[in-house]
Structure formats: C-alpha cells, structure tokens
Image: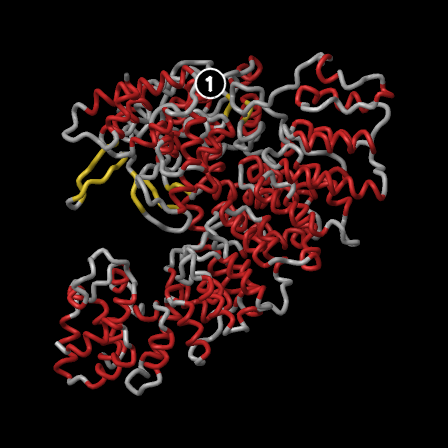
Amino acid sequence: MNKELISAIREENWAEIRRIAFALPEEEKAFFKDKFTYHNVQEIYPETPKTHRYGANKEFAVSYAMMCICTNLKELAEVENRLDFGFYGRRYYQQKYLFLFLISQQAQAFIDFLHTPQGAYMAEGAQKMYIEYPNYLSFEMLLALYKEGLLPFNEEIFVKRMYAMEYHRTQEELVVQLLSQNPELATRVIPHTAKYIDYTLGSNLEWKKVFTLLCKKNYFPDKSFITSFVEVLLNPWKKNVLDMYCRWIEGLAPTEKELLPSQHTLFALLTLDKSSLINFAMKCIAQISTHPAFDFQAFADNFALCFTVPKIAKSQLIGVEILEKYYQKQAPTNRDYREQLAVLFTVPDTKLQEKVASLLTTYFSGEGLAEVVAPYQDYLKIPTPVPPSEGRGASLNSTQETATTPPTLSPYSEEKEVATTLLALCPPSGKSARAEYVEGMLFLLGDCLREPAAHTIDVFLEGLITLQDDFPADWAKSLSPYIKQLTKRKGNEIPTDTILLGVLCALIDQRPLTLDPKCSYTWEEMNQKRKKLSEKEFETYTRDYYLDKARQVLPFLFRKGQMVIDAILEHCHLPLLSTPTHLPFYIEAEVLVDKLLQYEAQSKAPDLDDLIVACNRLLFKEVSAAAKEKAKQLKGDYAKAIQYYLGITDDIQLTEELLPLWAQITRIKYPDREFPEFATTSAKDILGVVKPYLIDYGWQEDDGHKEFTFGHHTKWVGISYTDLKNAFPYRYYNANGGCSPISTIFEYKLSLNPHYPDAMLCDYISTWVTGNEVREVRNMSLPLEVLLHYDIRVRHSGWLYIGTALLFEKRPSRDLAYEYICQAIAHGEDLSYLKTYLAQVLAWDYLPIPRFIEFLDRPNPPAVKAFGKEVVALYLEEVKKQEKLPRYHKKLAAFGD
C-alpha cells in the first residue's frame, strides 16, 4: 500500500492526493480500489473509533482519492458503492450518481481536480448529481460549480441548499465570509427564502446572527424582501418555523420605512390567537406607530381581537400605549370601543389594568361606563375605574357584588352545552343576502387554509352545495388567488390543502374529482417530465401525484370532495350528512335524522362514508324524543343501526355491507363492552371491533438487539404526508384504519372519530427515549393539545399515548400529559390501565425514572398524590420480577414509604 498516499489522505492534503494518485501504476490503483471496500476504510484511521461522525473529512478524503484513481463515472460509482461510509454508503446502492465528495464543503479542492485532464470526467458527474439529487450537493460545491459555468441557476435549489449549510452555532462568521464573497446572493437567493423555506432547518447554524452580521457589513442593497418574511407568518405552519422567521426578521433589523409596507400584515397577526406571533408583531407595530402613514384605525380594530389572548400582557400594554398616544392627538369617536377595552380587565396585570382604566376614565367617561366595567370587577387588582360623577367610587371593587357570576367557558363535548348552529346549515335567502353569503364563503375558504378543521373545511364544502345555483359570473376569478396559494403549497405535505385544491380545480373546470391512473409515477419519473413539459403542463401533471398521496391519508375528505363536485354537476341539493352542526365537530341527532329522511324522500341512498363519519360525530347521549320519533320512520338498510345508536332498540342486525357502520356505533355507544356478534364476520380480526381497543406492548428482539414496540399492527411507510399505516380498511376508524397523517392536521383527523380516538393516538407514540427529532416532538405534543382543548377523553390504549407523553424527554409534552391526567382524576375516571403501564415501563427500564419523579415532586393535590403512590406501589411489585434494577430505583422506591 502506498504510504505517501495514505499520509496525504490522513492530512487531507488535496494537492498531494492528486499528485500521488495520478502517478500510481495501474496495479496499485486496482489494489486501492479493491482494498477500500465495505468496512476497510477504518484501516487508514486506526486511532478513530468506528462511531465517529459520518460525513467527516476523513471519508471525504478517501472519496477524493478514489475520484483521482478512477478514470470515468461508471468506475467511480462502482467503487463508491462498495465503500462503507455508513449513512451515505447505504444510499449508493439506490442512487447511481450520488458522489460523496460533492457533499463536502471542499469546493476548491474539487474545482482544482476538475481543471486537471484526469479530473475533467467529473464535470459530467456533477451535472448528473445536480439533475438527479440536487439536495445532496453542499452549498459551497453548488456555488463553485455555478461560478464555473457547469450548472444553471435554480432559485429553489440554491435557497434550500444555502440554508442547509453544515456549520455549527459558533461558526456564523464563516458563513458571513462566504456570503460576503458572493454579493449576488443578496439579490438572487436570500430575498426568495419565504417561497421555499417552510420547515425547520436541520443545521444548528443561528441565521439570526448571520443576518445581523451581514447587515452590519451593509451586505443587502435592498431589504424590501422583509415584506415576504412577514407575510409567511400568516401561514398555518409549525410554531417553530414561524418563530424562526420572527428571529430572522429581528436579525435583519428592519427600519421603520422597511416595516411600514407590512403594517396590515402585522395587524392581521394580532388576530391569530398565537402569543409568540402577537408579541413579535406588537414590537414591530410599536416601531412604526409614529409614522404619518400608520393606519391607526386598522390597528385599533385588529388590536381588539387579541384582548382575550393569554400570556401577552406586555404586548397588550404596548398596544394600549399606542392607543393613548393617538387619543392624545384626537379623541376617539367610537364610544362602543370602551366595551372592547374593558375586556382587558380580565388580564391579571396591574400596569395594564391601570393603563386601561386611565384610557376609559379620560377618553370614554360618561354615562354607562359603570355598567361597562361592572362585569369585570372580580378580575380587578385596582380600584374600579368609574368617575365619581357617576355616583360610584373606588369602594365598588371591594364592596359591591354583581347579581350574577361571569360564566366560565367549558370545553366542547357531548355532555356540555354545545355552541350555536353553524351558518352553513341556515343559508340566507334573498339576493343581497346570498351575495353576502358568497363573500362569507371566500372568507371561510381563507380560514380553511389557516386552520384545517372540520368547522372550516366541511362547512365550506357544504356551502358549495348550498350555493351552487348562485355562483357569481366571476366565481373562477374570485377563487383564483386561493388556488394560486394552494398550488404554491402543494408540496408542503398538508393533505387538506391538496384535496381542497383538487376540489376547487374540478369545480372551475366543471369535471368530476377523479385521479389520473398514471398518478402513481415515481419521483424520478416526475423529474424527467419537468424537463419536457411547460410549467403549466407540469403543474397539471403533478397535481394528481400529490392528490393521490393526500387521498391515502384522508380518504374520507377526498371522497367528500368527490361527493360535492358530483352534487354540483348533477344539480343535487341534498345536504351532506357529516357536516358539523355544533362546534367544533359534533352533529345534532335530530339534524342527522332529518337529513336521512330527505334522502329517502328523494329515493336516494346516502353515501356510506358520509354516514359513518356523521355517526362518529353524533351527539348520541342526549337524544330528544322528537329525534327518536323521526328515527322510527327511517326505511333504509341503515335504519336499524341508527335506531340502535339512538337507544330505540337493543337489537344488533349485522350485514356485510354495513359492518363498518355497526362496528363504529357499537364501540362508540358502549366502549367497554365485548360484541361476540362480530366474531363470525369478516371484521372479527380488526382491533376494537369484538373487544375494546387494547394493544400489547413491551421489549422485542430484533436482529440481535432489543426494541420497545406497541402491537397496533402498523408498519413504517415514510411517504408524503404520513409515516405509518395499517392493513385495516379506513372505514374502521376505531382501529385507525389506513394511514396516519402528520400531526399538524391532527385536529381534522380527530374530528372523524372524536368519541373513540385511542387507536389514532397510538400511531403518534414515539418509541425513542431520547434524541427525538422534530417529527416525534411534534407528535407527542400537538395531538395532546387538541385533546385538552376540546376535552376529548381516552378509554383504553389511548392511555399509552398519555403515559408516554408524561415520561417524554421534552418538558412541554410532560406538562400537557400532567394536565390531562389531573383532569381525568378530577372527573373520577378509571386510571388502572395507565397506572399499570407506567409501573411496567419504569420497572422494565424503558422510560427514565427521573421523569416520573418530576411528576411526584410537583405540588400535587391529594388525589393526584394518591395516584402517584399507587403507581409506585405497582412499580415495586413489578420490579421484583426483573433480573436487574433500573437506575434511580432507590429514589423512586422512597416515594412508596
């Protein structure tokens, strides 16, 4: 073996590697190519542990040497296929033109190689990799090859690769140096960030600091692109992505002039009920509030919409101070605004309450102010702000009591009083009213994009059927901005967006919502088409590709979209069964029965998918006598199932066609029962049908090592929009049949089966104890937030999700699970299943004991303390069965004394 070459590789001396490798005789070249296959690379670095980081310069140096030894692309690809470079090496078997050195940051070494006669062949290799796998090229390499004229400029690729640069948090100066040497990036790449970066960056680099340093160097000739950074904050993206853009905007240090064009966008952020965005927006608004072009009235109108948002007292105080400054110049003319301002008394912040009181008494005093303030006096930390002229003084706060106690808002559930009936079910009549309804539909479509939920999307789809005879002449033009926005977001893995786009396009084209049978083409085939088709043709070609992926995740929503389009094409005005009548996603029993009778009156069979989801959403526990009487009139094959569900009969009369319907309503109505009636049917092996949804869990041997698994019959698929799927038909919602969508749209997924969510929750359980990535962290928090927000209860194996969240590595998930468990204890729920699970995973040394000790150390009420002690008692019994005690056993055992 040539010691000189080995030494050059170890020292990463690129010039020496080239010189020595080019001069090697063919025999030695063949020896090297054979020697460095599979795991033999370690022989060059005997002092380096095998666990060193993949992709370090050590591997790149070997790859560079092989590039110099080989004479053509085919030969290099064959050699690199045999090299053992861990993560990268495994991909070589599938990707012919992924050349490792092009991933590195050593762009100058590669360019020097290209300029030699022996290295000219790699120009084609770089071009092939750019076409086939551009997302693996390092940004340094991409930039160098572009400047050499070897690669065309592609805005999207350059933006995404720039933000994927592999630098650490302390290396911002290196990035600034690179960008400063390429000033064209300030106009051709960075300004287009918002078009393509809608995800959390994998790099640890702090871009806020990068932007700050660049601004100090006056790197940007024009920072008008800040407007696009502000606009993305209105998108329904993940919180950490939106927070990232907020930091970037702060790093760019926009001036008053640069922020002013975004003032109305900033005002809109105040209406989003997101505290971090409101706090950011208010800082920017304060910066521009003294400019002559500041739209004060628009600010005041939008500011009022964040008065009830919690944890933004400082921002609310800033906003009130802005109001005060303007009122000093011109007194307010809208007396009703004082009623909105008074809502701020519910915020437990003394400074804010004092400022609001000052505004009210200075600018809104007079008759009626005492009545405005009275409902909020229980919240006041200051004397009641009522002028003495109205006959009530400061003592009102402490001595006078209101006749009624302010009502407390309760979460939505079937036991609670539900909200008012949704507008879409009561469409207005009359020409002017219908015009307003059309306008309202467009606003609702915007809500669908911002908040993909049943009370937005399903109501919008219902509205299309209601409105079909009144579509305005310019309807396509009115929908065009929404279609453009949805088209841009097509690849963002938001299946609700993709299906909405399909519905709107089919609506405008007046065609059924169907899929091209060729839509199952591969990503590589699609990239080939990109070269041959125009932009418009390619957009049409790919629409069905994404639509099919979305259909796999949300088959019901896709089917519902088909039903809407079919109804419009056939001029059918029958309502959809599954549209919510009560917030957030529930349906009144009598309304459903009335709709079924409408179908029967027109001799039209209801769609089974629509009927099943309607039953899943039904408020079935308190059914009116009128609803039951009407249900007795039903004639369809579903009549017995509906009558059973509403408590009219106890007879279960199964048919093969309606098995999914019967499986759903029996389990939802009696969640703890066993149903032997299904034991001889085709549904007998589907989880949750015969018996409640209770799955097993524990350690399993897999290829020599142990892993903790849950027996919910899922498999990893890792395709667009989803990670997991099972073999159960999607109509069996109690078993979470089909695919699980990304957790960002969990609220819509939950709306399809809110009474029995256990199975769908199990698909979001992370089996990683530590080192969870963004997806797992999101999965272990977002669904739990939705459960708490809507007071959704779990019954059986759903407790596995709650228990895992309680012991998850991220504190926010543990806090959410703690709150959920406290609520369950307060409700008197049976938590024996959860106690057993917690005791076992702790005794089996799966989840860390310190995380449960954190739960025990909280200032818990007696009932929660008793729950903790019962878990510890079960743990002590279970740990006796183990061969080895888990770490921190003694600390946990001490809580059992």
Identify the image quadrant of residue 808.
top left
Q: Quadrant of the N terminus?
A: bottom left
Is residue 30 visible from the viewing direction of this image?
yes
Q: Choose between 683 and 880: the one closer to the eye.
A: 880
Q: Which residue is drawn at 28% across and 16% down?
A: 897
Is residue 637 visible from the viewing direction of this image?
no
| Secondary structure beneath label 1 | helix
Instruction: Say which residue label 1 marks.
Output: 643
Q: Which residue is drawn at 49% across and 73% down?
A: 153
60 sits left or right of 614 in the view: left
Mark 1 belongs to which amino acid? Gln
- Measured as percent of width and height from the top left, residue 832 is found at 32, 19
Identify the image quadrant of residue 2.
bottom left
39 sits left or right of 897 in the view: left
Q: Choose between 877 and 563: the one closer to the eye.
A: 877
Q: Choose between 90 and 435: the one closer to the eye.
A: 90
- Measured as percent of width and height from the top left, residue 855 is found at 38, 27
Considering every residue shown, the one lying at the far bottom of the view is 117
Q: Choose between 204 and 335: the one closer to the eye.
A: 204
- Measured as percent of width and height from the top left, residue 641 is found at 43, 22
- Measured as percent of width and height from the top left, residue 157 is found at 46, 66
